[in-house]
Image (cartoon, rainbow, N blue to C red):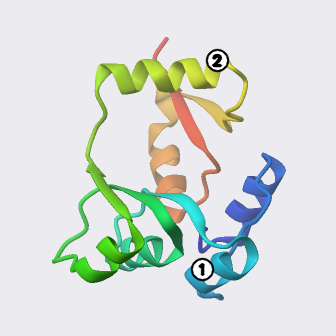
């Protein structure tokens, strides 16, 4: 789920089976129709709307992990959470164990990371690209 078609194309290229542009289609309705809802949703966008959409797109027994802190309140329907057995987790950073498990998972080859390298001298152009939304994946700064 994204609002940028180029990011969705990259996700498909990296192995995503289903993608949806949330600016054009209700992602919750689309994912419920296409796959019966998601087993889990990881929200990295700092957006209350993205948080709400994630709750709507998970299936019964699903888990929503919220990262980041958007401004304002985030109301939940306790009735819907309990009735549908939805688990909601919040996280700003992970533990050392989380990091180790993530690295072990990546080592299995299951993660297709899209990275680029830039020299420290290029940091201003990297920030410009980041602010414009023109970075696919992550950029690693080379300090050498």
Q: Name the residue rendered at 60%, 51% in the picture.
A: 135
Q: Quadrant of the N terminus?
A: bottom right
Decide: is 85 above or below 72.
above
Return the x and y of residue 33 as percentages of the image width and height: 70, 82
Q: Is residue 87 left or right of residue 131?
A: left
Residue 27: image tag: 1
Return the x and y of residue 15 as percentages of the image width and height: 80, 48
Residue sitting farthest toward the front: 83
In the structure shown, which secondary structural element does the residue marked by tag 2 occupy?
helix
Mark 1: few, some, or many residues within 10 Å (few <14, many ≥20)?
many
Give 85 or 77, whichever is nearer the viewer. 85
Return the x and y of residue 96 as percentages of the image width and height: 31, 20
Quadrant of the image occupied by residue 51: bottom left
Give 24 or 106, whichever is nearer the viewer. 106
Q: Is residue 87 left or right of residue 13?
A: left
Decide: is 110 above or below 32.
above
Residue 48: image tag: none
Is residue 76 in view from this perspective? no
Return the x and y of residue 7 as percentages of the image width and height: 68, 61
In the structure shown, which secondary structural element does the residue marked by tag 1 occupy?
helix
Q: Is residue 128 left or right of residue 96?
A: right
Decide: is 51 above or below 104.
below
Q: Is residue 125 left or right of residue 46?
A: right
**Residue at mark 2:** 107
Q: Name the residue rendered at 55%, 54% in the picture.
A: 129
Q: Mark 1 touching mark 2, by CB under 8 A?
A: no
Q: Name the residue rendered at 65%, 50% in the picture.
A: 136
Question: Real-space Cα distance between discs 1 and 2?
Answer: 31 Å
């Amino acid at each position: 789920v994204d609002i940028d078609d180029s990011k969705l194309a990259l996700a498909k290229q990296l192995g995503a089976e289903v993608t949806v542009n949330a600016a054009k289609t209700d992602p919750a309705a689309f994912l419920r129709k296409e796959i019966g809802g998601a087993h889990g949703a990881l929200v990295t966008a700092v957006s209350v709307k993205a948080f709400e959409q994630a709750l709507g797109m998970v299936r019964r027994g699903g888990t929503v992990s919220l990262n980041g802190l958007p401004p304002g309140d985030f109301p939940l329907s306790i009735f819907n959470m309990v009735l549908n057995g939805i688990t909601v987790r919040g996280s700003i950073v992970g533990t050392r164990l989380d990091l180790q498990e993530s690295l072990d998972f990546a080592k299995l080859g299951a993660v297709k990371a899209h990275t680029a390298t830039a020299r420290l001298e290029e940091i201003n152009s990297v920030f410009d690209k980041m602010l414009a939304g023109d970075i696919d994946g992550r950029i690693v700064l080379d300090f050498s």
